[in-house]
Image (cartoon, helix red, strand yellow):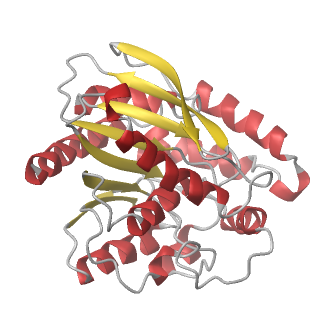
Amino acid sequence: MVHPSLEPYVNAVRAEPEPHPSLVSADERRAAYRESALANRGDPQAVESIREVELALDGRTLRARLYVPLGDESKALVVYFHGGGFIVGDLDTHDALCRRLSSDTRMRFLSVEYRLAPEHPFPAGIDDAVDSIGYVFAHLAEFDDPDVQLIVMGDSAGATLMTVACALTRAEDLRIAAQVVIYPTLGPDLFTDSVHEYGVGHALDIDHLRHDYGLYLNGWTDRSDPRVTPLMFEDLTGAPSAIVVVAQCDPLRDEAVAYAGLLEHFGVRVELLEAEGMIHGFLRLPTMVPEALEIIDDLAKHMHRYVEAAK
């Protein structure tokens, strides 16, 4: 059952659903997503400083934004990848969430603006995630104390990219204390029970996500490729410890739970946090559901435990 605080929002989504993405240009969708994000962000959390930075990767430069919280403890640097179905989202759409997370964890956050489809289809986003993490580790002194650990975090499509990046780089010594996986999409084959139960009328329309996967994959047909479907990784031994956050009323809930189980199967430490009554994307809706802030507070405590355990 949807949380009472979210019922007006869900009812509004059902009454006036977004047009099918096939009928709207990517630029128009990005503008609408940005407008909605800014309208629902609430009062921005105060932080010590924010700095616009650039990551000079091989053949391209990515924008990023560094958040330094009040009371910075320099325990870990969090590299963050935003959601948006591989098509929309940017530094500004997730600014409020990064501010809050940085403040609650007292850790620095580096939000990365990776390349989006359809202009930059698969595997561009994966490459950006892998190369960004490697770049940050190699240049830690530019962002934080050079001896701090990394935490890699993402939500929705951003979580997909960072789970793959963590798997592909697990043999490297990048000092990743944890991967924080927030309501991820873990492949285009969307046929779980939670998809059937919540795939329409709960903020994330599965038919829209299937369309976005088509744009993202751009003709790539091998859905068994673990870079496309992380649940297909044959071995995740040595992957970073994980915190997996799921929303009860999210169509993507079951695959996130399956990912947690897959990690556990390969001996990876996992904590699964389920937000009762919440929908996909709820962490960006603090003005509608104040309980989202409590969940962020709880997540921050778990992150601190992982950092302490990794020392």
* Residue 5 visible from this viewpoint: no
- Relative to 23, is 18 on the left or the right? left
Q: 151 or 273: which is nearer to us?
A: 151
Q: Position of residue 151 (x, y in %)?
A: 30, 47
In this picture, residue 282 sits left or right of residue 63: left
Tell me residue 87's x, y (percent): 71, 51
Identify the residue at image location x=9%, y=46%: 308
Q: Position of residue 90 (x, y in %)?
A: 62, 36
Residue 219 at least partly seen: yes
Quick check: 232 above or below 70?
below
Whole-percent x, y for residue 264 in the image: 24, 77
Q: Give the mark count.
A: 0
Query: Which quadrant is home to the N terminus?
Result: bottom left
Residue sitting at x 66%, y 67%: 206
**Above-or-below relation of 221 to 278:** below
Residue drawn 51% across and 51% down?
131
Image quadrant where residue 190 sits: bottom right
